[in-house]
Image (spheres, coloured by chain):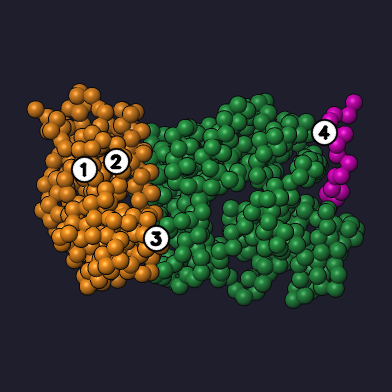
Amino acid sequence: MRSNAQAQSNLMWPYYPDLLARAVPRYTSYPTAAEFGTDVGVAEQRSALESAQGPISLYAHIPYCSQLCWYCGCNTGTVGNGARLATYLEALTQEIALVSALLPHGSHIGRIAFGGGSPNALTPIQFARLLDQLVVAFRAHAPQISIEIDPRDFSPDWAATLKGAGVSHASLGVQTFAPHIQAAIGRVQPTAQVESVVAMLREAGVRSLNFDLMYGLPGQTPDDLQDSLARTIALRADRIALFGYAHVPHLIPRQRLIKADALPDQQARFMMAAFGYDVLTRAGYVPIGFDHFALPDDPLALVTQQGVLRRNFQGFTEDQAETLIGLGASSISQFPDRIIQNEKNAGRYRMRVSSGQLAGNGGVLRSADDRVRGAVITDILCGRPAELAPYLSRTVEEGLAPFLARGVARLEGTTLHPNADTAPYARSIASLLDVYRAQAPQRFSSAI
Amino acid sequence: MRSCDVCVVRNRAICAGLSPDELDSLNRIGRHRNIAAGQALIWEGDDALLVANVIEGVLKLSTGTRDGKEQIVGVVYPSDFIGRPFGQRSQHSVTALTDAHLCVFSRNDFDSFAREHPELEHKLLQRTLDELDRARNWMVLLGRLSAAERVAAFLLDMSERLGNPACEGNAAPHESIELPFGRQQIADILGLTIETVSRQIARFKADGIIDAPSRRSIHIVDRAALTARAG
């Protein structure tokens, strides 16, 4: 008997496993974090801050959660008795003072984003004080504010705080509504809890609400995914990020708690991603890049229509600022000509900033070539036509051939045009432009 | 007798509503401080961050900028709670603009006390949000280009916050303000010269928007017009 999920799946993307055989980065930056070197640090960070131009976005990282979920690869630890968090906040305050003092006079802060970890592992008072510090230090009187929320730690006081602070964008870590999968990934949050948090966030004035959802989870069936998508659609999430769970316990030890034998295989994962795309686009969501979706009136959909969707460390974004300053341990700052990552270890981060030093510890200077390639990679990932002219070398042509042969993209002159089947292959196509990944055209040609 | 019993701001301060027992415990972790105009608030020999209730007086919160200048980041009045991080381990400082009387606590002591008294914690949250709101308004005020806008916005802010300290709740804004400080201090706070401040006040007066019966008193005649001048 066909399940509901299978019955609806006649729009499915075509599955070509050979085109997906190579592991490729997510390209939240180019060059990627794998190319960061320790030769770039405080000096490069200082000069970039001193000469920052145009609108600036801030990202503040809170690397703590009240409970750790087993699947999560984020840089985060448990709150414990709260002392670690309080000490961290003190260091963050010091970094805010250091960084803000270096920016040119009159710098304009357009956005402040809080991520983690779980920013709501802070108490509401801690959050309000942190925002106050940012407002005063950066003279940011009317920034657009966004925050990641763990529904398990939300409260009416938090809702009142978000309202008082004027937070307009929130992202909920939902992942799945299926109780058996929640148990298998160490993140139990009943549907009623999520529904109540959504109601509180709307009441508090959150206009753009994102749900993070996952496919490829242990024991997850297409019907489970369909159920989670249906509940998400019913709650009118303005945005949805549908991520594939990557099981890499050798890199992320806490994933050892997840039983590998119940994980869907690559084909099942592909079908779930494809199914998610079909369900959400049929429900009226606009596909954004390769794994995001947004209601047509959400800013993310509007910038996509205008052809100016961007990609940064937070994923796909409508933010047009050229400068993103990351604050907190492991945060990444993006400037047009360089990327700098803060010290990742919270203890060493604290030592750095409390001795009056910037926290930059690694990164990359982006050459002119990096910047042009980065722009082409962004075009491909954002699902818009990409001009390949400067790079349509023999190597890229060979690599591209199997994608063109399968019809998952079309080359017209030197412009690569995406189509409805491009999204799952976008990262693989983008990687052909990446000089830091070994090009291996023979691997692709063997599949033709 | 506890000093709280005769405190002139107790109906409006953050501690309003605490029981006599709770006030006793709060008294044990707090200290009273008198500060003369021009003096900075510090807690000797302790590097903890401070919070304080303002009982009497007006104080400025400021921070040093890279070029060595002082930037005023807020002004606090009687019954206000000073909850922003300041003290020796932060770049903020608190300086009395007039002789002032405060009830001072270490941040950690006060926060622990609040955690054990949910009603106080709730008020603390509310005060912190109010402070955030004021910080934003202040940044808007400092971002205003014209002197007329700054002076008008500052007079409006003072009229809303310089109420009778004994009054409960959020009283309506006062049409008559007794200035706690002179034109020079207003000029310092707003980053203007004393001549500019005096000129703006004279102009508002000539236009019939305010009256200035003496050097220290301002009467708001036409609030709507003053609001319009604030931009």
Say whether marks 3 and 2 touch (CB < 8 Å).
Answer: no
Q: Left or right: A398 with respect to A260?
A: right
Q: Nearer the viewer, residue B57 or B121?
A: B57
| The magenta segment | A1-18
Mark 3 and mark 2: span between their CA atoms?
Answer: 22 Å
Q: Nearer the viewer, residue A223 or A170?
A: A170
- Residue B201 location (% of width, % of height): 25, 66
The answer to whether tags 3 and 2 share a subunit is yes
Q: Residues within 10 Å of mark 1 (few under 14, many from 20)?
A: few
> In terms of secondary structure, where does tag 3 sit?
helix
* Chain B drawn colour: orange
> Is tag 3's residue or tag 2's residue first in the polypeptide sequence?
2
The chain ID associated with circle 1 is B
Residue drawn at 71 percent across, 54 percent down: A289
Quarter assignment of residue A394:
bottom right
Tell me the number on the disc at residue B171: 2
